[in-house]
Amino acid sequence: MAVCHFHRGNKLSNNAIPNVSKRWPPNAVGEAAKLCEDLGHYVEESSPEIDQAALGKATWVITTAQTRARLPFVEKVLGRPVTTEDFEPVTWAYLETALQFSASDYAEAINVLHLTGRVVGRSSPVTISC
């Protein structure tokens, strides 16, 4: 039997990551936990302490940087420099936003993701027994 942990108490708010307005359905986590229980898993709730603001910024830095990192490929495919006409407005905004971050910001964002992963991992031991 697998021991599954789910996190309900410390959800990311939509304000943690700029320009994100979609939300999970109101009881998505509870329904997923119920499904796991129905499949024979033992489910425990846990609430790791996550720095939501730091995680939101880190996600934003990495997302915009990775979007910008694809520019040389797009220009190679197009055979010319890109313009605003080549992208949807939100993608162009990501490309411009990435310019405000440094390599140090990116490295720190990776560190924040690693730290968050360790925090969540410590609160969610998964054991499997046959």
Image (cartoon, rainbow, N blue to C red):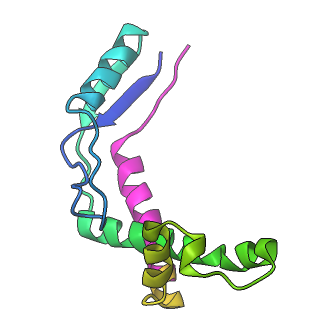
Vertical relation: 61 (above or below) 56: below
Judge by depth and name the residue closer to the eye, 129 or 28.
28
Which residue sits at x=63%, y=77%? Answer: 69
Which residue sits at x=76%, y=83%? Answer: 80
Q: Quadrant of residue 73?
A: bottom right
> How far from the left and from the top, in percent, is residue 2?
46, 21
Q: Is residue 79 left or right of residue 19?
A: right
> How far from the left and from the top, in percent, is residue 72?
72, 80
> How far from the left and from the top, in percent, is residue 62?
49, 71
Vertical relation: 98 (above or below) 87: below
Main secondary-structure element of the magenta-colored stretch: helix
Judge by depth and name the residue closer to the eye, 119 or 32.
32
Q: How many marks?
A: 0
Q: Is residue 36 left or right of residue 110?
A: left
Q: Is residue 109 magenta?
A: yes
> How far from the left and from the top, in percent, is residue 27?
22, 28
Q: Is residue 51 magenta?
A: no
Range of the magenta residues? 107-130
Which residue sits at x=56%, y=13%? Answer: 130
Vertical relation: 93 (above or below) 121: below
